């Protein structure tokens, strides 16, 4: 890896401590960006720098008890300093910062450049497929969620989502599970993606997750019937 990218990587690694948003996530997203960028007219230096730096403020958001930190916006600010140290010209710094500020799912800033759209797509793809299953259970463990919740979605949302809506904040994580996260958020990801290539990958990964959660539903339900202790 080129020296400047290696420096960015080191700075990001020092900031990350959450296993679902670790350096492996950052490197997978960077690789996916480069794949999605094939055949596109983009600045690969802007894209690669943005991908490496995109979650630099993730832990700072998680640690904010007041929930006021937006890691995308703060990440763009933190990136500015690193990019200046690495002598990136202002015009390039602005383009990289825009990609970082716009990569978040629920953000006030939407991706306006192709580089920003590609980073947005690559980041979303990393919550899907087998990696997505693995990462969602890492998060579930961190928040004491359940392995599977079999409450019908409407009833779940009425009880445990602020405003009773799909994107409403979760009231009690102990009543939440990765299959709910899949139904309310991950399944809808293809609707918000910008590139056709990412949409295709997303659909394949969602099919895999449908099968996985169906198997999980069966196994958790079967055990209840077989033991009849609930
Ligand atoms: Fe992020
Ligand atoms: Fe990310």
Image: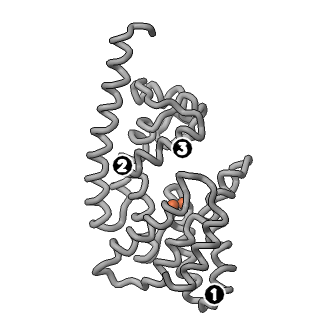
**Is 38 situated above or below 122?**
below
Q: Residues within 10 Å of mark 3 (few under 14, many from 20)?
A: some
Q: Earlier in the sequence, mark 1 or mark 2?
A: 1
Residue 86 disc label: 1
Image quarter (top left, top right, bottom left or bottom right) of the C terminus: top left
Q: Percent position (x, y) of residue 33?
A: 40, 71
Q: Residue furthest top?
A: 228
Image quarter of residue 79 = bottom right
- Horizontally, residue 210 falls left or right of residue 170, namely left
The residue that label 2 is drawn on is 130
Q: Earlier in the sequence, mark 2 or mark 3?
A: 2
**Is 84 situated above or below 135?**
below
Q: Percent position (x, y) of residue 49?
A: 52, 78
Residue 139 disc label: 3
Mark 3–mark 1 Cα distance, whole angstroms, equals: 34 Å
Residue 78 disc label: none
SS type, badge 3? helix
Image quarter of residue 14 = bottom right
Ligand 2 near label 3 (Cβ, under 8 Å)?
no
Question: Residue at the spot x=31%, y=25% of the render?
Answer: 218
Residues under numbered marks 3 and 1 in contact, where contact means CB atoms less than 8 Å apart: no
Mark 1–mark 2 Cα distance, whole angstroms, equals: 36 Å
Q: Nearer the viewer, residue 224 or 58?
A: 224
Image quarter of residue 202 = bottom left
Question: Residue at the spot x=38%, y=75% of the render?
Answer: 34
**Is 212 situated above or below 58?**
above
């Amino acid at each position: 890896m080129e020296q400047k990218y290696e420096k960015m990587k080191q700075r990001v690694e020092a900031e990350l401590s959450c296993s679902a948003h670790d350096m492996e996530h950052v490197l997978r997203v960077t690789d996916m960006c480069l794949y999605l960028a094939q055949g596109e007219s983009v600045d690969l230096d802007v894209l690669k720098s943005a991908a490496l730096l995109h979650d630099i403020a993730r832990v700072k958001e998680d640690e904010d008890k007041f929930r006021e930190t937006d890691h995308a916006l703060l990440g763009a600010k933190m990136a500015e300093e690193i990019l200046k140290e690495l002598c990136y010209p202002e015009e390039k710094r602005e383009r990289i910062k825009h990609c970082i500020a716009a990569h978040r799912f629920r953000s006030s800033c939407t991706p306006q450049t192709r580089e920003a759209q590609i980073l947005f797509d690559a980041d979303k793809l990393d919550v899907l497929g087998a990696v997505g299953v693995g990462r969602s259970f890492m998060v579930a463990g961190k928040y004491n969620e359940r392995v599977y919740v079999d409450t019908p979605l409407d009833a779940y949302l009425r009880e445990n989502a602020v405003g009773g809506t799909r994107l409403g904040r979760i009231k009690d994580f102990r009543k939440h599970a990765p299959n709910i996260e899949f139904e309310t958020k991950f399944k809808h990801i293809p609707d918000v993606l910008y590139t056709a290539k990412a949409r295709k990958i997303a659909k394949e990964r969602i099919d895999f997750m449908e099968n996985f959660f169906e198997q999980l539903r069966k196994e958790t339900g079967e055990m209840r019937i077989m033991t009849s202790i609930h």
